[in-house]
Image (cartoon, rainbow, N blue to C red):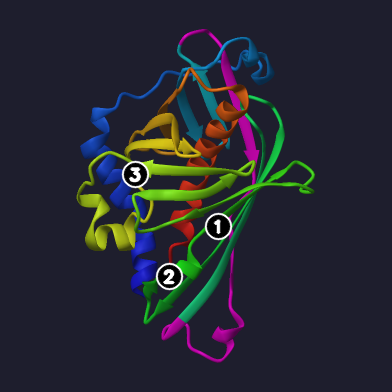
């Protein structure tokens, strides 16, 4: 089936892209696990170097203006389950699946326990994925006990504003501001890279730019970034900006696995 063939080829294609494009961004050195996120209140964080290891499920936030490094561990694995419609309709003709993930982690700045719930639906006609507004990934953010909703963000496959929604009742957007590459157009984007593999992005809260980050090419299980925070932000806004970045980072794998 075409969609499954593309799934099998995705890893090989990304490895090829890493070999050809990865030389433009140097790999980061090993990071220590010192410092504590709650102690960052005494000085605004401005420039962070970040690595996420998808195998160990750790995200390392290294403050470039101090020796402090914060490690954010997360738990959760995306799952998929088929639709009852495929009990009567051959999946080779029409296939529908639901995708879910629940990630648990502590906010890297405030150390507040947080739950990220994401869901989406994939549909395929004769193995060709069909994407619509109703099937787009939706992210909900809750406190650790899942008794209070902190926000909702929706992913857009086709817009330069990749995520839009709210966090703590404030409007939040993540927009790609770098130029599109060949990977961001046509069949390559539709079948293989529904989520950007590299680029520059801005995070806006209530229409104001509060952070900017660069996504570098993934190396194996490691996803490297550079994040710059607006030093004029209050702490609550800074926490929301970093939480929006965490959503972007964690949702990369989910979007790829649920795109159909």
Splitting the image into 4 quarters, where does residue 191 fall?
Answer: bottom left
- Tag 3 near tag 1, CB within 8 Å: no
* Residue 238 falls inside the magenta stretch: no
Up-down: is 143 above or below 154?
A: above
Look at 29% across and 27% down and name the residue there. 25
Mark linked to residue 197: 3
* Residue 73 falls inside the magenta stretch: yes
The residue under label 2 is 132
Q: Nearer the viewer, mark 3 or mark 2?
A: 2
Disc 3 and disc 1: Cα gap in Å?
20 Å
Residue 79 seen in render: yes
Look at 34% across and 33% down and name the residue there. 216
The region drawn magenta spans 65-94
Splitting the image into 4 quarters, where does residue 127 fall?
Answer: bottom left
The residue under label 1 is 138
- Quarter of the image containing the C terminus? bottom left
Q: Earlier in the sequence, mark 1 or mark 2?
A: 2
- Tag 3 near tag 2, CB within 8 Å: no
Left or right relative to 180: residue 84 = right
């Amino acid at each position: 089936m075409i969609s499954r063939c593309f799934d099998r080829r995705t890893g090989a294609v990304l490895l090829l892209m890493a070999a050809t494009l990865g030389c433009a961004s140097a790999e980061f050195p090993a990071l220590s696990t010192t410092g504590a996120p709650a102690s960052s209140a005494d000085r605004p964080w401005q420039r962070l170097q970040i690595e996420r290891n998808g195998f160990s499920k750790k995200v390392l936030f290294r403050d470039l203006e101090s020796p402090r490094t914060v490690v954010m561990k997360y738990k959760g694995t995306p799952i998929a389950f088929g639709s009852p419609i495929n009990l009567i309709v051959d999946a080779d003709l029409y296939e529908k699946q639901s995708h879910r993930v629940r990630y648990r982690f502590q906010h890297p700045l405030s150390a507040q326990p947080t739950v990220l719930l994401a869901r989406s639906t994939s549909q395929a006609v004769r193995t060709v994925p069909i994407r619509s507004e109703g099937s787009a990934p939706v992210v909900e953010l809750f406190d650790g006990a899942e008794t209070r909703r902190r926000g909702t963000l929706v992913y857009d496959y086709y817009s330069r504003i990749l995520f839009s929604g709210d966090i703590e009742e404030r409007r939040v957007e993540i927009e790609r501001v770098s130029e599109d590459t060949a990977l961001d157009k046509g069949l390559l984007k539709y079948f293989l890279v529904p989520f950007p593999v590299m680029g520059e992005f801005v995070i806006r809260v209530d229409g104001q730019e509060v952070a900017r980050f660069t996504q570098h090419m993934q190396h194996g299980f490691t996803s490297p970034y550079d994040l710059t925070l607006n030093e004029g932000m209050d702490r609550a806004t800074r926490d929301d900006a970093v939480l929006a970045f965490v959503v972007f980072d964690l949702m990369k794998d989910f979007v790829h696995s649920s795109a159909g």
